[in-house]
Amino acid sequence: MKEFDYRDNTGKEILESIKIAKRFNKWMFDVIHPYCGSKVFEIGSGIGNISEIFLNNHDGQIFLSDIDTDYCQILKKKFSAHKKCLGVESIDLVAPDFQTRYSSYFNEFDTVFALNVLEHIKEDQLAIFNARQLLKDGGTLIILVPSYMFLYNRVDKGLGHYKRYTVKSLETIFKLNNLKIVHSQYFNFGGIPGWFVNGKLFKNDSISVSKMKIYESLVPLFRIADRLVYHKIGLSTIVVGEK
């Protein structure tokens, strides 16, 4: 199964829109960074929106990956010369031959993270199992996914999302794969109304650059909103587990 076939169309448009959302991307980084060790593996790097922030702000090193070979070429061109970039490779997290094809990466990393990746993979439990194998003992797996099936809309469908999650449902997958829960929270409470209106009411199947610019301008307020609701509700779900 190839979890990112969708990226030839709607996914690429979304990534390009998110590229301008530098405040939002930095916010995601700020939330997950405290749980990152010195040697990091990013699953689903895309065109490098988060990768660039890590390379410029994280003290350690990072290995970049994506199932889409075109994206990998973009990543190599942008980051391969960076002293903190350990490499770039096309990785299929649910490949039938994962055990042999990627065994050289097993037990190598302090942290593995995948932001907005798992929802594209039907075999999500297998994906978590395989991601865990990349970790050293005591290493951390960080997963960020969309929240709440009632918010599933045309954008999700266009992106090839199989589902949306809750903290409880994602924690269950972690526990089934012998990952100790270190931290769980919801993220981006302020994004819920816009997502609902754009996808449910207006039935749009993408996020325009103009809408993303509006959202980007509101990120400082959304950061405050998350603190006010104590991270108990949000457009995204984050779980951190330890091997």
Image (tube, grey):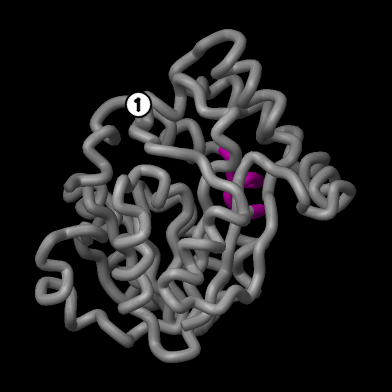
Occupied quadrant, residue 59: bottom right
| Residue 22 on the magenta span | yes
Q: Nearer the viewer, residue 116 or 75?
A: 116
Left or right of residue 56, residue 80 in this image: left
Q: Which of 62 and 170 is in front in this view?
A: 170
Does residue 6 sit above or below 1 in this rendering? above
Left or right of residue 96, residue 79 in this image: right
Residue 170, percent from left and from top = 53, 57
Question: Which residue is at 37% across, 31% downward?
Answer: 159
Question: Which residue is at 49% across, 76% downward?
Answer: 179
Q: Mostly what secondary structure, the magenta segment?
A: helix
Q: What element carries label 1?
A: helix
Residue 168, percent from left and from top = 61, 56
Q: Give the range drawn in magenta.
A: 21-27
Occupied quadrant, residue 102: bottom left
Residue 133, percent from left and from top = 31, 78
Question: Which residue is at 16% across, 59% downward?
Answer: 95
Left or right of residue 165, residue 134 in this image: left
Residue at label 1?
A: 10
Amino acid type, mark 1: Thr
| Residue 238 on the magenta span | no
Occupied quadrant, residue 239: bottom right
